[in-house]
Image: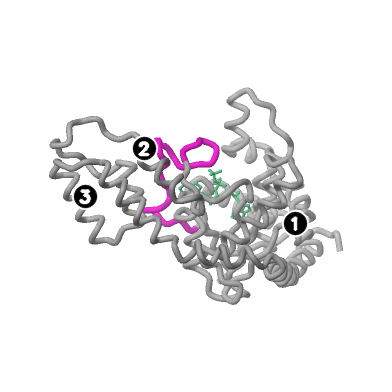
Amino acid sequence: MRILSGIQPTGRFHWGNYFGAIRQYIDLQNGQDTAFYFIANLHALTTVREKGRLAQNTLDAALDLLALGLDPNRATLFVQSDVPEVSELCWILMTTTPIGLLERCHAYKDKKTKGLTADAGLFAYPVLMAADILLYDSELVPVGEDQIQHVEVCRDIAGSFNHSFGEVFVLPKAYVVKDRAKVPGLDGGKMSKSYGNAVDVFEEIPLQKKKIMGMTTDSRPMDQPKNPEGDPLFELYSLFASEEQTKSLAATYRRGGFGYGNVKKELVQLAESYFAEARAKRRELAAQPEKIHEILAEGAAKARKKASEVLLRTQQACGLK
Ligand code: ADP
Ligand code: TRP
């Protein structure tokens, strides 16, 4: 079964990206031919318009993914634009994609509702994402909750192409882990780099500590019982804690008589030890950029092999070859 996912290099990864997406990549990697992960720099062009920043973000994304446990021996890691076949497939798919389908997609719709003008790139974003998925006959796509719609759109695009030209594409399924589908941010809303409520995986510990200690919490007196469910601090804590620790904290919440300050301190410590190994690995990898470029070049060569097969099949099906 082919597993594939992509992540945009639009900034440093935060806890939401890790638990909602990256951790699933790592858990699911089971072979260079079956697990494909890429850095979606063509998608990032819809928002990052500075060449130095895009290039740096792309390298950082590779370093972060490798440090967090993506293993080039058990998965293929590449940069999206290193496989130019994807842009050609994107155009071909565009010709059979109904406009109405794209008008319903949230990134474009949200921008339009806010009265902002959108570029064609943002409008066609889901078609490029469909090309990413279909180009490798992907079956399973691990993503966070907000990307489920795009995987559904990919199925619709593939279905409509298959309807016109025969069974060319494999229909993929999204893979979402419920407990981690929506990691809360410091303000209780969805953690996102655009909301200023994120804790980055590799940011300095004192900064992480300052952010967490400053989280707003329930203002009721300490002795009152509280409900752990839906409490963002509790939810963040449970991502890092063992099952036992989580159960015990849930009981403490229900009993009341505790201070949020202590929970926050524990969260800082748990997160620090959770990522300690990855931090050390990242420092080690950052000192050898040529090794990272080598891994990405090998990854792109592997990905292109499969991509050219599927592109040829598609070109033949619609009369381009
Ligand atoms: P952001 O919202 O910070 O811009 P992206 O849209 O680039 O993040 O998301 C990259 C990946 O991380 C996607 O698969 C997305 O579903 C996942 N993700 C992002 N934020 C969260 C979150 N708060 N909880 C769970 N998954 C998330
Ligand atoms: N749109 C995804 C995001 O913003 C990134 C992405 C691009 C992707 N192509 C993909 C994810 C293909 C899964 C499969 O997070």
Q: Which mark is residue 52?
A: none
Quadrant of image for the C terminus:
bottom right
* Percent x, y of residue 255: 13, 44
Instruction: Looking at the picture, tell me which residue is in the foreground, 255 or 21.
Output: 255
In the rendered structure, which segment of residues is drawn in magenta?
A: 175-197
> Label 3 is placed on what type of residue?
Ala
Q: Which residue corresponds to mark 1?
A: 81
Q: Which mark is residue 215?
A: 2
User: Between disc 3 and disc 2, whose residue precedes?
Assistant: 2
Residue at left offset 59%, top offset 38%: 107
User: Between disc 1 and disc 3, whose residue precedes?
Assistant: 1
Residue at left offset 84%, top offset 60%: 319
Residue at left offset 40%, top offset 39%: 186
Instruction: Looking at the picture, tell me which residue is in the foreground, 51 or 161.
Output: 51
Is residue 177 found inside the magenta-colored segment of the image?
A: yes
Callout 3: SS = helix
Label 3 and label 2: CA atoms lie apart by 19 Å
- Confirm or deny contact between disc 1 and disc 3 (CB under 8 A): no
Callout 2: SS = loop
Label 1 and label 3: CA atoms lie apart by 46 Å
Q: Which mark is residue 250?
A: 3
Q: Please tell me in which quadrant of the rendered image residue 124 appears.
A: top right
